[in-house]
Image (tube, rainbow, N blue to C red):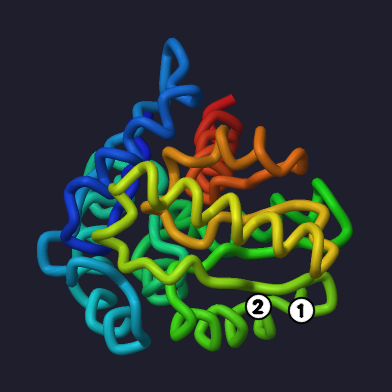
Amino acid sequence: MSQRILVINPNSTQAVTDGIHRALEPLRLPGGPEFECVTLREGPPGIQSQRDVDGVIGPMTKLIAERAIDHGGDCSAFVIACYSDPGLFSAREVTKKPVLGISECGVLTALTLGQRFGVIAILAQSIPRHLRYLGAMGVTDRLAAELPVGLQVTELADAGRTKQKMIDTGRRLVEEHGAHVIVMGCAGMAQYRAPLQDALGVPVVEPTQAAAGMALARVRLANA
Protein backbone atom coordinates (compact mmCIF):
# COMPACT_ATOMS: atom_id res chain seq x y z
CA MET A 1 0.00 0.00 0.00
CA SER A 2 1.19 3.50 -0.84
CA GLN A 3 2.92 5.45 1.90
CA ARG A 4 2.98 8.82 0.09
CA ILE A 5 1.43 12.05 1.36
CA LEU A 6 0.99 14.79 -1.23
CA VAL A 7 1.43 18.32 0.14
CA ILE A 8 -0.01 20.85 -2.32
CA ASN A 9 0.97 24.50 -2.43
CA PRO A 10 -2.02 26.00 -4.29
CA ASN A 11 -0.11 29.11 -5.35
CA SER A 12 2.46 29.15 -8.13
CA THR A 13 5.40 30.50 -6.08
CA GLN A 14 8.03 27.78 -5.97
CA ALA A 15 9.88 29.46 -3.09
CA VAL A 16 6.83 28.81 -0.88
CA THR A 17 6.87 25.12 -1.85
CA ASP A 18 10.59 24.93 -1.11
CA GLY A 19 10.00 26.40 2.35
CA ILE A 20 7.24 23.88 3.00
CA HIS A 21 9.55 21.05 1.96
CA ARG A 22 12.18 22.20 4.47
CA ALA A 23 9.60 22.65 7.24
CA LEU A 24 8.53 19.01 6.90
CA GLU A 25 12.04 17.61 7.38
CA PRO A 26 11.47 16.70 11.08
CA LEU A 27 8.47 14.58 10.05
CA ARG A 28 10.34 12.48 7.50
CA LEU A 29 10.79 9.16 9.30
CA PRO A 30 12.58 5.96 8.31
CA GLY A 31 10.02 3.73 6.64
CA GLY A 32 7.78 6.63 5.64
CA PRO A 33 5.30 7.85 4.78
CA GLU A 34 7.05 9.97 2.16
CA PHE A 35 6.07 13.63 1.87
CA GLU A 36 5.95 14.96 -1.68
CA CYS A 37 5.57 18.74 -1.97
CA VAL A 38 4.18 20.12 -5.23
CA THR A 39 3.34 23.55 -6.64
CA LEU A 40 -0.01 24.11 -8.34
CA ARG A 41 1.18 25.81 -11.52
CA GLU A 42 -2.35 26.99 -12.34
CA GLY A 43 -2.51 29.00 -9.12
CA PRO A 44 -1.80 32.73 -8.64
CA PRO A 45 1.50 33.89 -7.08
CA GLY A 46 -0.32 34.09 -3.74
CA ILE A 47 -3.75 33.15 -2.40
CA GLN A 48 -4.75 36.60 -1.13
CA SER A 49 -8.44 37.02 -1.98
CA GLN A 50 -11.64 34.99 -2.09
CA ARG A 51 -11.38 35.02 -5.85
CA ASP A 52 -7.90 33.45 -5.59
CA VAL A 53 -9.34 30.80 -3.27
CA ASP A 54 -12.20 29.99 -5.61
CA GLY A 55 -9.95 29.91 -8.68
CA VAL A 56 -7.72 27.07 -7.50
CA ILE A 57 -10.46 24.67 -6.40
CA GLY A 58 -10.96 23.10 -9.83
CA PRO A 59 -7.33 22.33 -10.71
CA MET A 60 -6.47 21.28 -7.18
CA THR A 61 -9.34 18.82 -6.78
CA LYS A 62 -8.49 17.43 -10.23
CA LEU A 63 -4.91 16.82 -9.06
CA ILE A 64 -6.10 15.15 -5.87
CA ALA A 65 -8.50 12.89 -7.75
CA GLU A 66 -5.72 11.86 -10.14
CA ARG A 67 -3.20 11.11 -7.39
CA ALA A 68 -5.50 9.43 -4.83
CA ILE A 69 -4.78 5.75 -4.33
CA ASP A 70 -8.50 4.95 -4.31
CA HIS A 71 -8.63 6.21 -7.92
CA GLY A 72 -5.54 4.34 -9.08
CA GLY A 73 -3.03 6.98 -7.98
CA ASP A 74 -0.10 6.76 -5.57
CA CYS A 75 -1.08 8.94 -2.57
CA SER A 76 -2.74 7.87 0.66
CA ALA A 77 -3.33 11.36 2.08
CA PHE A 78 -3.26 15.00 1.05
CA VAL A 79 -2.39 18.31 2.71
CA ILE A 80 -3.67 21.60 1.27
CA ALA A 81 -0.85 23.96 2.22
CA CYS A 82 -2.63 27.32 2.14
CA TYR A 83 -4.09 29.01 5.21
CA SER A 84 -7.42 29.62 3.45
CA ASP A 85 -7.90 25.83 3.06
CA PRO A 86 -9.07 26.33 -0.56
CA GLY A 87 -11.17 23.47 -1.88
CA LEU A 88 -10.92 21.45 1.33
CA PHE A 89 -14.50 20.25 1.36
CA SER A 90 -14.65 19.73 -2.41
CA ALA A 91 -11.46 17.67 -2.21
CA ARG A 92 -12.99 15.47 0.48
CA GLU A 93 -15.72 14.61 -2.01
CA VAL A 94 -13.30 13.30 -4.67
CA THR A 95 -11.37 10.82 -2.49
CA LYS A 96 -12.01 8.67 0.56
CA LYS A 97 -8.42 9.24 1.68
CA PRO A 98 -7.61 11.91 4.29
CA VAL A 99 -7.51 15.50 3.02
CA LEU A 100 -6.27 17.98 5.61
CA GLY A 101 -6.23 21.76 5.46
CA ILE A 102 -3.48 23.65 7.25
CA SER A 103 -5.78 26.32 8.68
CA GLU A 104 -8.14 23.83 10.29
CA CYS A 105 -5.26 21.71 11.61
CA GLY A 106 -3.21 24.68 12.77
CA VAL A 107 -6.08 26.12 14.77
CA LEU A 108 -7.05 22.75 16.26
CA THR A 109 -3.43 22.23 17.31
CA ALA A 110 -3.31 25.69 18.88
CA LEU A 111 -6.35 24.87 20.98
CA THR A 112 -4.33 22.10 22.66
CA LEU A 113 -1.50 24.50 23.53
CA GLY A 114 -3.30 27.46 25.10
CA GLN A 115 -6.68 28.92 25.92
CA ARG A 116 -6.53 31.84 23.48
CA PHE A 117 -4.75 31.82 20.14
CA GLY A 118 -3.62 34.68 17.94
CA VAL A 119 -3.09 34.53 14.19
CA ILE A 120 -0.47 36.38 12.15
CA ALA A 121 -1.95 37.12 8.72
CA ILE A 122 -0.12 38.39 5.66
CA LEU A 123 -2.54 41.16 4.67
CA ALA A 124 -5.43 42.95 6.36
CA GLN A 125 -7.78 41.94 3.54
CA SER A 126 -7.16 38.27 4.36
CA ILE A 127 -8.58 38.60 7.86
CA PRO A 128 -12.34 38.77 7.09
CA ARG A 129 -12.00 35.58 5.02
CA HIS A 130 -10.19 33.84 7.87
CA LEU A 131 -12.77 35.05 10.40
CA ARG A 132 -15.59 33.56 8.33
CA TYR A 133 -13.79 30.23 8.46
CA LEU A 134 -13.12 30.41 12.19
CA GLY A 135 -16.80 31.20 12.70
CA ALA A 136 -17.76 28.12 10.70
CA MET A 137 -15.38 26.08 12.87
CA GLY A 138 -17.04 27.45 16.02
CA VAL A 139 -13.80 28.62 17.64
CA THR A 140 -14.06 32.41 17.59
CA ASP A 141 -14.51 32.53 21.37
CA ARG A 142 -10.96 31.19 21.70
CA LEU A 143 -9.48 33.74 19.24
CA ALA A 144 -7.49 36.54 20.88
CA ALA A 145 -7.02 38.47 17.62
CA GLU A 146 -5.68 38.22 14.10
CA LEU A 147 -3.22 40.87 12.93
CA PRO A 148 -1.44 41.35 9.57
CA VAL A 149 2.26 41.81 8.83
CA GLY A 150 1.34 43.75 5.67
CA LEU A 151 3.41 41.73 3.20
CA GLN A 152 2.49 39.99 -0.04
CA VAL A 153 3.17 36.23 -0.25
CA THR A 154 6.01 36.88 -2.67
CA GLU A 155 7.63 39.30 -0.18
CA LEU A 156 7.89 36.73 2.62
CA ALA A 157 11.21 35.45 1.23
CA ASP A 158 12.90 38.68 2.47
CA ALA A 159 14.06 37.02 5.68
CA GLY A 160 15.25 40.03 7.68
CA ARG A 161 12.22 42.18 6.98
CA THR A 162 9.68 39.39 7.39
CA LYS A 163 11.12 38.00 10.62
CA GLN A 164 11.09 41.37 12.34
CA LYS A 165 7.55 42.16 11.19
CA MET A 166 6.37 38.78 12.45
CA ILE A 167 8.05 39.27 15.81
CA ASP A 168 6.54 42.74 16.19
CA THR A 169 3.08 41.47 15.23
CA GLY A 170 3.39 38.43 17.49
CA ARG A 171 4.34 40.62 20.44
CA ARG A 172 1.20 42.71 19.91
CA LEU A 173 -0.90 39.56 19.88
CA VAL A 174 0.66 38.34 23.13
CA GLU A 175 1.07 41.60 25.05
CA GLU A 176 -1.96 43.60 23.85
CA HIS A 177 -4.49 40.88 23.03
CA GLY A 178 -3.59 38.13 25.50
CA ALA A 179 -2.74 35.35 23.07
CA HIS A 180 -1.27 32.25 24.73
CA VAL A 181 -0.26 30.60 21.45
CA ILE A 182 0.41 31.96 17.96
CA VAL A 183 -0.67 30.45 14.64
CA MET A 184 1.26 31.48 11.54
CA GLY A 185 -1.40 32.41 8.99
CA CYS A 186 0.42 31.59 5.75
CA ALA A 187 2.39 28.59 4.50
CA GLY A 188 5.03 31.00 3.21
CA MET A 189 5.98 31.84 6.82
CA ALA A 190 7.21 28.32 7.56
CA GLN A 191 10.91 29.15 7.95
CA TYR A 192 10.24 31.70 10.71
CA ARG A 193 8.56 29.46 13.28
CA ALA A 194 11.61 28.75 15.46
CA PRO A 195 12.93 32.34 15.71
CA LEU A 196 9.40 33.62 16.30
CA GLN A 197 8.81 31.17 19.14
CA ASP A 198 12.19 32.03 20.67
CA ALA A 199 11.42 35.75 20.53
CA LEU A 200 7.87 35.53 21.89
CA GLY A 201 8.28 32.86 24.56
CA VAL A 202 4.93 31.22 23.73
CA PRO A 203 4.15 28.21 21.49
CA VAL A 204 4.05 28.99 17.78
CA VAL A 205 2.18 26.65 15.42
CA GLU A 206 3.41 26.28 11.86
CA PRO A 207 0.15 25.00 10.32
CA THR A 208 1.66 22.92 7.51
CA GLN A 209 3.65 20.97 10.10
CA ALA A 210 0.46 20.55 12.13
CA ALA A 211 -1.51 19.22 9.15
CA ALA A 212 1.34 17.02 7.94
CA GLY A 213 1.72 15.53 11.42
CA MET A 214 -1.98 14.64 11.46
CA ALA A 215 -1.73 13.15 7.96
CA LEU A 216 1.29 11.13 9.04
CA ALA A 217 -0.62 9.68 11.98
CA ARG A 218 -3.66 8.88 9.84
CA VAL A 219 -1.61 7.00 7.25
CA ARG A 220 0.50 5.12 9.80
CA LEU A 221 -2.51 4.08 11.87
CA ALA A 222 -4.48 3.04 8.77
CA ASN A 223 -1.77 0.49 8.07
CA ALA A 224 -1.04 -0.54 11.67
- The quadrant the C terminus occupies is top right
Residue at x 62% of width, y 46% of height: 205
List x then y, in percent, for residue 40. Answer: 18, 59
**Among the 4 quarters of the image, the one containing residue 183:** bottom right
Circle 1 Cα neighbour tier, 10 Å, few/some/many (<14 / 14–19 / ≥20): some
Give the vertical position of 46 relative to 180 (above or below): below
Observer-nearest of 127 and 87? 127
Residue 83 percent across, percent down from the top left: 46, 64
- Amino acid type, residue under disc 1 in the picture: Thr
Residue at the farthest top position: 30
In the rendered structure, are the residues bearing label 2 and label 1 in contact, judged by CB atoms less than 8 Å apart? yes
> Hey, which residue is sitting farthest left in the picture?
41
As drawn, 221 above or below 165: above
CA distance separating discs 2 and 1: 6 Å
> In front: 47, or 211?
47
**Snapshot quadrant of residue 156:** bottom left
Viewed as shown, does residue 220 lie left or right of 175? Answer: left
Residue type, mark 2 in image? Leu
Element on which disc 2 rests:
helix
Residue behind mark 1: 140
Secondary structure at numbered mark 1: helix
Tell me which residue sits at (30%, 48%) in the image: 158
Q: Is residue 45 above or below residue 77?
A: below
The answer to whether 172 appears left or right of 116 in the picture is left
Tell me, for residue 134, which label it has, or none. 2
Which residue is at 61% across, 83% downward? 131
Where is residue 220 shown, x and y percent of the image? 54, 29
Mark 2 and mark 1 lie on one chain; the one further toward the N terminus is: 2
Query: Residue placed farthest to the right in the image?
Result: 115
Q: Nearer the viewer, residue 150 or 90?
A: 150
Residue 59, above or below 161: below
